[in-house]
C-alpha cells in the first residue's frame, strides 16, 4: 500500500539557517520588495463539507491530555468562542477553493498496551490509521505518546499527513508527543530551542509542554490534510516535500515574528501563559500562522 507524505517540519532546524542571513535580509529590506508567497493549486480534490476526525491514541495519555486535544478539535467548529478563536483561525481554510471544511470528532481508539511496540515505522502509522475506518470524508489521526519512537520523528518532522492509494483510499495524519524526545524542536516555543537564538520559552497555555506542542503540530497537519489531502491540492515546491497551508509559515505565531522569535502573542494575566486563540471549555491555544490565499501571505491571529 503506497502512501504520500507531507510533514510538519522541525522549525528550529530552519532557524539556524535563516538567522545566519538575518542581517543581510534586514539591510536589503528597504531596497527589495518582499515577494508574495504563493501556494499553487494543482487541480486536485480538497476535503470540504463535514469531515470526521477519528482519533487513534497509541501509548499512554492521561484523560486530561486527551481532553486538551479533543477540546482543540471541537474548538475548530465552535463559533461561540471569544475572538481571536480557534474557529476563526480554521475559517481561513474556507478560502482554499471556497467552501467550509467542518471538522467533527468521531470514534476514539485507545491502544495503551503498545500493540506494535514502542518503535514505529511509517507503515505502522498507516496500519494504526486504518483502524479508524474508511467511511466517507474522514481523517484518521494517530497520536503517539511521549515514549514512542517514530521513524523520522525529531530528525526531520514533528508530524505528518498522507493518503493511501488503491480501491480503499483514506486520508490520515500523525503527530507525536515530543516532551521527552525533542521538545526544543517539536514543542517550540514552549521549550528552549536546540539551535538558533536562545530566547526564553513561552509558558504553555494548558500547562503541558508536550501536548501544547502537539496542538501546534495537529493544527499544521490538519490544515495540510484538508487543503492538500492527496498531494495534488495547494502547496509550493516539490510534491515529495511540499510547503503547505501552515508548514509554509514556520515559526510564526504573532505579529512581528522573525526566526527565533514567535511574535507578539496574548498572555494570560493569571497564569502567565502565552496564547493567541480561545477555544471551548475556556481553553486557550497557541496556533501557528496559516497562508491566506486572499492575501498571498502568512496570516496570524494576533
Image (cartoon, rainbow, N blue to C red):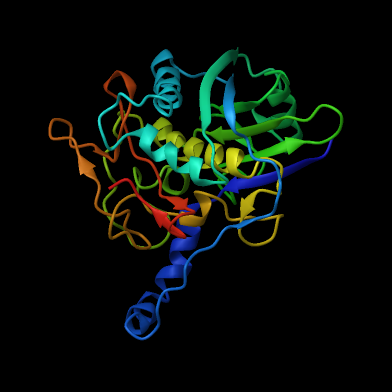
Q: Is residue 72 above or below residue 20?
A: above
Residue at point 32% right, 83% down?
30
Q: Position of residue 259 (x, y in %)?
A: 38, 62
Q: Residue furthest bottom?
A: 31
Q: Position of residue 137 (x, y in %)?
A: 66, 25
Residue at point 52% right, 26% down?
103
Residue at point 33% right, 21% down?
280
Q: Residue furthest left?
A: 269
Asked whether, in this view, residue 20 is left or right of residue 264, the answer is: right
Q: Position of residue 257 (x, y in %)?
A: 32, 59
Q: Is residue 51 above or below residue 4?
A: above
Toward the viewer: 48 or 270? 48
The quadrant where residue 131 appears = top right
Task: Tally the numbered discs.
Answer: 0
The quadrant where residue 52 appears = top right
- Is residue 299 something that shows in the picture? yes
Q: Residue furthest front?
A: 98
- Is residue 179 something that shows in the picture? no
Toward the viewer: 204 or 226? 226
Toward the viewer: 65 or 146? 65
Question: Quadrant of the image for the N terminus?
Answer: top right
Q: Position of residue 46 (x, y in %)?
A: 64, 40
Asked whether, in this view, residue 34 is left or right of residue 270, the answer is: right
Asked whether, in this view, residue 179 is left or right of residue 197, the answer is: right
Amino acid at each position: 500500500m503506497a502512501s504520500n507524505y507531507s510533514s510538519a517540519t522541525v522549525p528550529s532546524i530552519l532557524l539556524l539557517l535563516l538567522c545566519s542571513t538575518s542581517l543581510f535580509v534586514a539591510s536589503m529590506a528597504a531596497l527589495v520588495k518582499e515577494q508574495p508567497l504563493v501556494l499553487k493549486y494543482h487541480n486536485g480534490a480538497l476535503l470540504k463539507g463535514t469531515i470526521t476526525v477519528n482519533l487513534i491514541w497509541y501509548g499512554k495519555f492521561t484523560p486530561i491530555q486527551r481532553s486538551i486535544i479533543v477540546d482543540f478539535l471541537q474548538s475548530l467548529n465552535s463559533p461561540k468562542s471569544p475572538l481571536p478563536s480557534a474557529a476563526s483561525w480554521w475559517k481561513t481554510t474556507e478560502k482554499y477553493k471556497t467552501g467550509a471544511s467542518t471538522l467533527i470528532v468521531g470514534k476514539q481508539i485507545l491502544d495503551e498496551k503498545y500493540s506494535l511496540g514502542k518503535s514505529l515505522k511509517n507503515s505502522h502509522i498507516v496500519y494504526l490509521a486504518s483502524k479508524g475506518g474508511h467511511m466517507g470524508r474522514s481523517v484518521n489521526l494517530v497520536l503517539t505518546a511521549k515514549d514512542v519512537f517514530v521513524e523520522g520523528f525529531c530528525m526531520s518532522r514533528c508530524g505528518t499527513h498522507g493518503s493511501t492509494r488503491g480501491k480503499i483510499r483514506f486520508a490520515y495524519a500523525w503527530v507525536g508527543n515530543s516532551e521527552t524526545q525533542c521538545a526544543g524542536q517539536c514543542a517550540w516555543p514552549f521549550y528552549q530551542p536546540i539551535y538558533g537564538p536562545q530566547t526564553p520559552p513561552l509558558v504553555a497555555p494548558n500547562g503541558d509542554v508536550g501536548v501544547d506542542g502537539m496542538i501546534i503540530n495537529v493544527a499544521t497537519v490538519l490544515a495540510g490534510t484538508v487543503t492538500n489531502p492527496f498531494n495534488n491540492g495547494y502547496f509550493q515546491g516539490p510534491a515529495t516535500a511540499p510547503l503547505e497551508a501552515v508548514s509554509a509559515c514556520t515559526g510564526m505565531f504573532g505579529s512581528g515574528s522573525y526566526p527565533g522569535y514567535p511574535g507578539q502573542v496574548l498572555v494570560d494575566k493569571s497564569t502567565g501563559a502565552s496564547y493567541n486563540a480561545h477555544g471551548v471549555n475556556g481553553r486557550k491555544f497557541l496556533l501557528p500562522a496559516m497562508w491566506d490565499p486572499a492575501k498571498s501571505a502568512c496570516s496570524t491571529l494576533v
